[in-house]
Amino acid sequence: MEQYNGIVKRYREVIALLCEPSVLADAERTLKLTKESKTLEPMVAAIEAVKTADERIAQAKELLTDPDMR
């Protein structure tokens, strides 16, 4: 999961960089970062979906062990 956190971290860094005036002033760098963000975006969406699913599974397992829920 650490590898996936690195992808999410890099995506957030790229998005933050794209908000900086110095980066926006450099068309080549802006283009490079925009392409990178478009590459990372679907991966980040999938990672977040998996994390949400894992959380829901953990909650469901917790409910299964709750004697009041049986």
Image (spheres, helix red, strand yellow):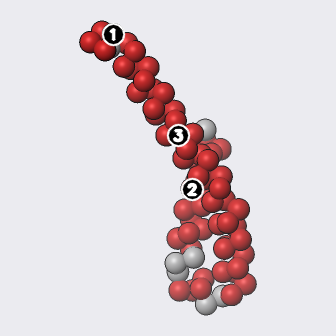
Evaluate whether residue 12 shows in this view.
yes
The foreground one among 47 and 21 is: 47
Query: Percent x, y for residue 8?
Result: 58, 53
Identify the secondary structure beneath mark 1.
loop
Left or right side of 32 for 14: left
The residue at the point 55 percent across, 44 percent down is 49
The residue at the point 48 percent across, 27 percent down is 57
Query: Mark 1 — residue?
Result: 70
| Mark 2 touches mark 3? (CB < 8 Å) | no
Q: Quadrant of the N terminus?
A: top right
Please identify, in this view, whether the residue under mark 3 or under mark 1 is nearer the observer.
1
The disc placed on residue 9 is 2
Please identify, in this view, whether the residue under mark 1 or under mark 2 is nearer the observer.
1
Q: CA distance from mark 3 to mark 1?
A: 26 Å
Query: Percent x, y for residue 2?
Result: 61, 41
Residue reaching furthest front? 70
| Mark 1 touches mark 2? (CB < 8 Å) | no
Query: Percent x, y for residue 53?
Result: 52, 35
The residue type indicated by label 1 comes to Arg
Label whose residue precedes the other's in the sequence (2 or 3): 2
The residue type indicated by label 2 comes to Lys
The residue at the point 36 percent across, 19 percent down is 63
Left or right side of 22 for 42: right
Left or right side of 49 for 27: right
* 61 relative to 3, above or below: above
Evaluate whether residue 6 shows in this view.
no
Query: Percent x, y for residue 24?
Result: 59, 85
The residue type indicated by label 3 comes to Lys
The disc placed on residue 51 is 3
The foreground one among 36 and 65 is: 65
